[in-house]
Amino acid sequence: MNRFLSIILLCLALALTHAAGDDKTSTEVPKTTITVVCKDDPDTDCASLKSNCNNSKLQKMLKEFCPVTCNLCPGATTTTPPKCADLDAAKCQAWNRNGFCMNTHYSDEDKKRFCAKTCEYC
C-alpha cells in the first residue's frame, strides 16, 4: 500500500472515530499504530546506485527509491562505509594489467572482493 493511501485511510479512520464520539467530550486521543514497510522500489536498479548512497545531493531520491540498499530506512543505523581497498594491491595491479577488471569471465562480486580499489568499485 503506498504512503498516500495509508494517510487517506488514517484520516478517514480518525474522522469516523471523531464523528462517532461527537456527543461526548473526551480528552482521550485514539491511538493509531502505523507500520511503514521499508523496501526498495522494484522498478529502480538500486544495486547500480549503491555507490552513490553517501552522496548528499542524492540522499532525498535514494531515501525514496533505495532506502534498504542505502541503509536509509526509518530507525536504521548508519555505518561508516567500508574502507576501499584491495586484498593484495600488488596482485591486483598485475591482474588488472592482464585484464582482470574488464574481463566478464569474473563476477563483479569477485572483482569487488579481491580488487575493489584497483577495479574502481569504490
Image: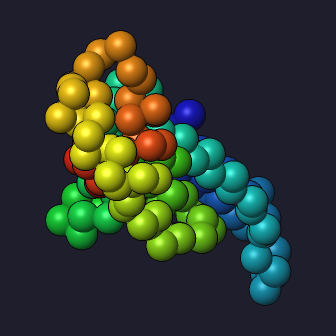
Give the residue drawn at x 57%, y 47%. 38
Q: Kindly tell me whether residue 10 is visible in this rendering.
A: yes
**34 relative position to 42: left or right:** right
Give the residue drawn at x 75%, y 59%. 33
In which quadrant of the rendered image does the C terminus lie? bottom left
Give the residue drawn at x 41%, y 23%. 107
Q: Quadrant of residue 23?
A: bottom right
Q: Nearer the viewer, residue 17 or 91?
A: 91
Give the residue drawn at x 47%, y 43%. 113
Q: Position of residue 31 (x, y in %)?
A: 78, 68
Above/below status of 113 relative to 122: above
Q: Nearer the viewer, residue 7 or 75?
A: 75
Q: Quadrant of residue 26?
A: bottom right
Q: Quadrant of residue 19?
A: bottom right
In which quadrant of the rendered image does the N terminus lie? top right
**45 relative position to 56: left or right:** right
Q: Position of residue 6 (x, y in %)?
A: 56, 45
Q: Position of residue 52 (x, y in %)?
A: 27, 54
Q: Nearer the viewer, residue 70 or 86?
A: 86
Q: Position of residue 17 (x, y in %)?
A: 73, 58
Q: Kindly tell me whether residue 49 is visible in this rendering.
A: no
